[in-house]
Image: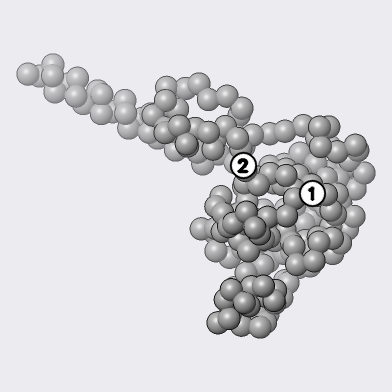
Amino acid sequence: MKNKNKEKLFNRRSFLVSLGTASLIIGSPVIGQSITTEADKLLSPTVRRNISSFRSLEWEPYFKNLKKGAILVDISSRALHIWTDNKEYSLYPTSVPMTDELIRTGRTSITRKVIGPSWRPTPEMKVRNPEWPDFIPPGPENPLGTHALYLGWTYYRIHGTHDTRKIGRRSSNGCIGLYNEHIADVFEKVAVGTQVLVI
């Protein structure tokens, strides 16, 4: 009887240790390309697929050069990759548009950088949500968070968010959202003219 209880205790402990390891893997900002630990086998196929898609990338398949740096936004993995002109690389989780109709892909660039942006809903947003205010000044209620990078496409931005639940989800009205501390970091690394590719 004692051996059976020890075996149950050992199995439960092994499971809890594996679960803890899995949560550390999921919580890591940059995930390796392969998943091989015993803890990973406890994850569902969907979670494993999402984790493996959030991986570091090389810039060469996407850009001809790194003049003024480069940003790659991958909608499917909900990740923003940034390379500075001196080839420093960073990877951040993002929110992405909530429906396929709101997604815009292709090449553009940063046209303006704003700390403490104000926000106005687009005409299409007002049609969908007539109860929304016409203007929100900078502050904790502003959906653009603390910093915004305006793109060459009208109404599209890479910006922060005060609602951290949105990151990692299809939750935006077209923009790419980051945690406020991450957009502040990206803001410092890029310049007006930085090339942006959304795929």
Q: Nearer the viewer, residue 19 or 106?
A: 106
Q: Position of residue 47 (x, y in %)?
A: 47, 37
Q: Quadrant of residue 43?
A: top left
Q: Secondary structure at mark 2?
A: loop
Would you say 186 lies left or right of 66 here?
Answer: left
Q: Position of residue 21 (x, y in %)?
A: 43, 32
Rate crowding at label 1 as few (under 14), some (14 to 19) or many (20 or more) other CA atoms within 10 Å. few
> What residue do we see at 74% from left, 62% from top?
156
- Seen as rendered, the residue at the extreme top is 3
Q: Secondary structure at mark 1?
A: strand
In the drawing, what numbered circle is on residue 77?
A: 2
Q: Quadrant of residue 166?
A: bottom right
Would you say 120 lies left or right of 10 here?
Answer: right
Give the amino acid type for the residue marked by disc 1 in the picture. Answer: Gly
Query: Is residue 17 shown above or below 158?
Result: above
Q: Which residue is mark 1?
A: 106
Residue 180 visible in rendering: no
Q: Position of residue 61 (x, y in %)?
A: 81, 32
Q: Position of residue 62 (x, y in %)?
A: 81, 37
Rate crowding at label 2 as few (under 14), some (14 to 19) or many (20 or more) other CA atoms within 10 Å. many
